[in-house]
Image (cartoon, rainbow, N blue to C red):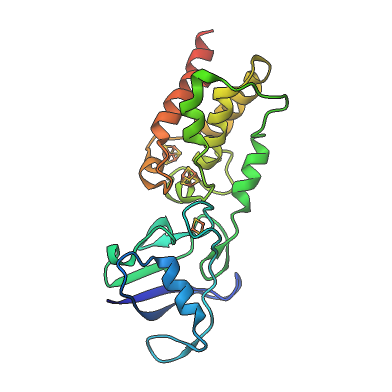
């Protein structure tokens, strides 16, 4: 099978972006976008569909098994993991773009440090030793599957990098802390969840349908909203 892959390219943040197209042939139906990008970059001389010599395509990857979140990009306009998306499910022309909510470094690589800074701002950690809470293992298990890939931030209508609202990527680890917090730490963690997530979230649940890890955002939000907001207000 033959596909055309249109890549939105940008040498560096200061230069203009442009689309460059590549032809790619594959036989195995399970071939992913990540495999195609690796194969294109492996060639001694890379040529685009016009026959022009092209530079290697800059993109990020690590595990190639949907476990690290590094290969997140827009594939046919939706945020996805390149190692998760099969070419056979994407049509004959495949559009690859960097995530748009983060600054571009080059081609398909972006600077997602704002997502990691959000975890520091919201202080997503225990300050004292945690005691495992047997009654909450389902929430903890669900939250622990987050890859910090940023796809939920990309799709979120309420998230922008410079806002107090930190999006679902920051809320997920907070939901885990809410489930396991000791009485001493609950106040701080509940306040963080409220300020950096609950107050800015429009409850559209776009983040539920896009998450490549299949995290049930509705389940996590319902439990955390109940514990951190509603039950607290009734006290
Ligand atoms: S919740 Fe899902 S989409 Fe959001 S960062 Fe975690 S794994 Fe990625
Ligand atoms: S429910 Fe909607 S507004 Fe809230 S984090 Fe998810 S996508 Fe964003
Ligand atoms: S390379 Fe790790 S999730 Fe795709």
Residue at the spot 33% in from the left edge and 67% down from the top edge: 87
Query: Residue 111 placed where, x, y %?
Result: 60, 59
Query: Residue 15 placed where, x, y %?
Result: 57, 75
Residue at the spot 67% in from the left edge and 20% down from the top edge: 185
- The answer to which of 90 and 117 lies nearer the viewer is 90
Describe residue 143's horizontal placement relative to residue 36 as left or right.
right
Vertical placement of residue 66 versus 12, above or below = above
- The answer to which of 40 and 220 lies nearer the viewer is 40
Residue at the spot 48% in from the left edge and 73% down from the top edge: 38
* Quarter in which the C terminus is drawn: top right
Q: Can you name the residue that lies furthest to the front here? A: 28
* Quarter in which the N terminus is drawn: bottom left
Residue at the spot 45% in from the left edge and 66% down from the top edge: 34
Residue 199 visible to the viewer = no
Describe residue 134's horizontal placement relative to residue 119 as left or right.
left
Query: Residue 161 placed where, x, y %?
Result: 57, 49
- The answer to which of 124 and 34 lies nearer the viewer is 34
Query: Residue 81 placed where, x, y %?
Result: 44, 57
Quadrant hosting ligand 2: top left
Describe residue 167's horizontal placement relative to residue 13 as left or right.
left
Residue 152 visible to the viewer = yes
Q: Can you name the residue that lies furthest to the right here? A: 128
Vertical placement of residue 158 versus 99, above or below = above
- Corner quadrant of residue 89: bottom left
């Amino acid at each position: 099978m033959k596909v055309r892959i249109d890549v939105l390219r940008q040498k560096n943040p200061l230069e203009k972006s442009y689309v460059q197209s590549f032809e790619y042939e594959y036989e195995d139906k399970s071939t992913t976008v990540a495999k195609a990008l690796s194969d294109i970059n492996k060639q001694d001389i890379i040529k685009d569909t016009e026959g022009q010599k092209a530079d290697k395509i800059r993109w990020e990857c690590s595990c190639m098994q949907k476990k690290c979140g590094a290969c997140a990009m827009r594939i046919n306009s939706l945020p996805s993991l390149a190692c998760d998306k099969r070419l056979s499910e994407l049509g004959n022309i495949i559009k690859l773009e960097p995530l748009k909510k983060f600054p571009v470094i080059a081609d398909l690589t972006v600077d997602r440090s704002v997502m990691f800074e959000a975890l520091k701002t919201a202080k997503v950690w225990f300050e004292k030793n945690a005691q495992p809470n047997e009654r909450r293992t389902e929430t903890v298990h669900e939250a622990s599957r987050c890859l910090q890939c940023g796809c939920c931030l990309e799709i979120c209508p309420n998230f922008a990098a410079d806002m107090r609202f930190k999006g679902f990527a920051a809320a997920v680890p907070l939901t885990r802390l809410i489930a396991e917090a000791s009485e001493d730490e609950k106040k701080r963690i509940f306040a963080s969840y409220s300020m950096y997530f609950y107050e800015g979230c429009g409850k559209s649940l776009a983040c539920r349908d896009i998450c490549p890890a299949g995290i049930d955002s509705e389940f996590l939000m319902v439990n955390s909203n109940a514990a951190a907001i509603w039950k607290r207000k009734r006290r």
